[in-house]
Amino acid sequence: MAETYDFPVPRYLYRFRRDSERHVGEIEQSYLWCADFRSLNDPMEGLFRSADRSWREALRVEKYQTGICSLTEDPRNVLMWAHYSDQFNGFCVEYDTYALLEVIQSALLVRVRYSDDIPLPSLGGDPFESAKSVLSSKGSDWAYEREWRLLKRGAGRQHYDHSSLKVVSRILVGNRASQYLMKGLKFAAPTVPIERIRLRDGKVMIKREARDPAR
């Protein structure tokens, strides 16, 4: 079971994806892609301050060995749809956070902290813990993303067991998405509700609100 820091976790988290066979395949094959931080779009990603050379090197090694899966708590953000779902041509996967944490092993879910101060990790602590702290910090310009991150050892696929728990609870499709994408998603996730969003007065409209089941 994945771990979390001590803060409330949203009932649902979302991942914006482009219209591509690889991204649709993530759903069909039940995995999340965890990227190397150097491939992310923020040029300031992973920066930190430390005067100790050996400590900097140990922390740098840990950063390179950590995979990152970016999620958000806001499925209605117009900028996110434009930037990460190919100008509303892609889709957004709704994950049941409780189910996801239940089936994913050896991972950590963190909420991103936004600050214009470069992180200053404690000298002499656990390099892996410090790397997680650094990789969960971003500049305040990115605060609109309301990002959460799943961190794991090593970049690559983080598989989950979709057979026992409904990890993917819904798929939201952009208003410009093709019928070809709709068919591909229905084939990849035949039991998952798929909903096409609408835009009204510059806002993203979602027909059905996700409901919190009793726990």
Image (cartoon, rainbow, N blue to C red):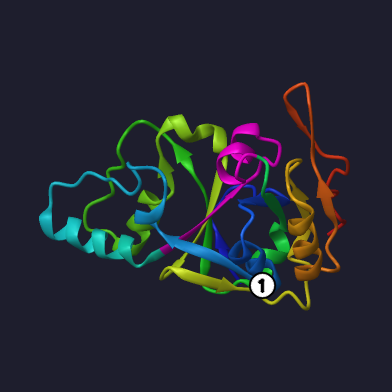
Q: Is residue 24 above or below residue 77?
A: below
Q: In this view, does 38 lie to the left or right of 175?
A: left
- Residue 84 among those drawn in magenta: yes
Tell me if residue 177 can be seen.
Answer: yes
- The three-letter code of the residue at mark 1 reads Ser
Residue at 84% x, 69% y: name it: 190
**Residue 63: x, y in percent?**
32, 60
Residue at 26% x, 65% y: name it: 61
Q: Is residue 112 left or right of residue 130?
A: right
Quarter residue 58 falls in: bottom left
Tell me the magenta residue range: 67-87
Tell me if residue 126 can be seen.
Answer: no
- Residue 59 among those drawn in magenta: no
**Residue 94: x, y in percent?**
72, 54
Judge the density around disc 1: few (<14), some (14-19), many (≥20) Cα neighbours within 10 Å. some
- Which residue position is annotated with label 1? 30
Screen quadrant of the C terminus: bottom right
Quarter residue 75 falls in: top right
Q: Which of 200 and 31 is in front in this view?
A: 200
Residue at 85% x, 43% y: name it: 209
Q: Is residue 33 above or below residue 16?
A: below
**Residue 214: x, y in percent?**
87, 56
Q: In this view, does 142 lie above or below 150?
A: above
